[in-house]
Amino acid sequence: MARIPAPVAVLAVALLYFCGAALTCQFERWHGGVAIIWFPGALLAAWLHACPRRDWAALLLACGLANVLAAAWCGPGWMPGVPIALANMVEVAAAATLARHALRAHWPDTTLELVALFLLGTLLVIPACGALIAATGAHAIGHAGFVAVFRGWMLGHAVGLVAVLPFAVVALARLREAGEAVLGRRTGDQGGHGHPRVASMLMVTTMALLTTCVFVQYEDWPLAAPLLFALFAAVWGDVLIATAMPMLVALIAAPLTLAGYGPFADADHVPLGLLYAGLVACGSLPVVVEQARRRREIARLSHSAAHFQALSARADSLIDELRREAQTDPLTGLPNRRAFYAGLAVHAASDEPTCVAMIDIDHFKRVNDRLGHAAGDAVLRRFAELARSSFRAIDVVGRIGGEEFAVILRDVSVEQACRICQRLTDRFAGTQIETPFGPVCVTISTGIAVIGRDGDAAMAAADQALYEAKRAGRARLASAA
């Protein structure tokens, strides 16, 4: 409707209201008081509840004129139609205001106050005000008795508001959400409800058949069945279907009773059929509202749990990332000094034969002084690449200082460790390393020792062997005795 020009929308609503009013007037007893549910007012109140207040005046005026026309055509005539239309529009505006205020003030935090305020307004205050206006007008023009019109009006309109208004408000909200979901899909958003349609249709069909069966026979005891089923739907059904149950009872029970069927078939007992429909609405509405609040709360908690679970997973990922960064040398990508010594302590505590090698890049300071730190960084990165490819996956290569590296060689003897490290020494010596200032060739010196129960002692022995290799001329390796 938001895409339709305002005058066209107002005329469309007024036409629908006229049809509903004319249809309802066919079943009403004007000389004995209104004795049928008045549903057009509840539907219009729900429409006003969903509209901005700036549109209310035009809608009320158009529907008031439509009400006068319906009363003149199908009801008591032109003269009674004016106070009747005035009473209806007052009721509609009051009911829409009540629904909007009650939902804004009490939903979803205080459902008891919400239901109490709604029932007080729809069952007593609003119908009484409308009945007073209609009965006074009808009595003033001599059309009908004040008491008869007041009693019948209040009963029919109270049941109409309490049985139809909740369903109409929910239905219009669902239609608005469905429209937003369509627009949302066009822009990549998601929306809508995932309610089981088959179960909902079965509930509606069951209630319609059950109420019809109860009100085509004349025993009183089956009257409990529709009420119990309405409570069942209030607990287990979707809120739209649950609010439809009292309306179904009212729309089926009242015409059948007026036609002479059902437990209240006597014409003097027609109001009892309306009272029964109102009882079903009053009994199920608190359960519907509370169940809707609980489902909303469960959905909110589920969303919060999923949100916090995602945050927790993200936090774990960040922690793992920070842990890796804290244990990794940023230039070479190898384990840093802290991570290497942690691994050394683990291997020192095991009985596995393990060796440690200390590796130093020869004359590295000359590279930095002559070619700059960018060239030195290129040398370090290239050595890290060769070291990764030269040692096994079970070995641990780490950078423990500026140009100093260390390797834990698992499950090897000193002789085997020497052969492995010698291959790396030869490969690195024969490699031209590309730097921003041209290729360079660099050698390494290595010291090797067995890791015993003391990892620090093994590192000291390997460092001493490295010193011996450098003193012997560099570009070679030595092992600790």
Image (cartoon, rainbow, N blue to C red):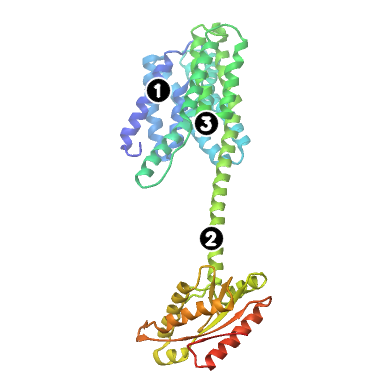
Secondary element at image label 3: loop
Mark 2 touching mark 3, by CB under 8 A? no
| Residue 218 in picture, x, y percent from top left | 57, 6
Q: Which mark is residue 67?
A: 1
Mark 2, residues whose alpha carbon is within 10 Å: few (<14), some, or many (≥20)?
few
Q: Position of residue 190 (x, y in %)?
A: 42, 44
Q: Which mark is residue 317?
A: 2
Quote the CA–CA distance across marks 1 and 2: 66 Å
Name the element at disc 2: helix
- The earlier-in-sequence mark between 1 and 2 is 1
Name the N-terminal-most of marks 2 and 3: 3
Query: Relative to 224, does residue 315 appear above or below in the rendering?
Result: below
> Cα distance, mark 1 to mark 3?
33 Å
Seen in the picture, residue 95 relative to 417 is either above or below; the reply is above
> Where is residue 160 drawn, in percent x and y?
51, 23
Q: Relative to residue 276, is residue 63 depicted above or below?
A: below
Image position of 328 with respect to 177: above or below: below
Q: Nearer the viewer, mark 2 or mark 3?
A: 2
Task: Mark 3: give few (<14), some (14-19) or many (20+) Cα within 10 Å.
Answer: many
Specify the label residue 238 is tagged with.
3
Amino acid identity at mark 3? Asp
Residue occupying image coordinates x 52% and y 31% = 238
As helix, strand or loop, the secondary structure at mark 1 comes to helix
Mark yes or no: residue 365 visible.
yes
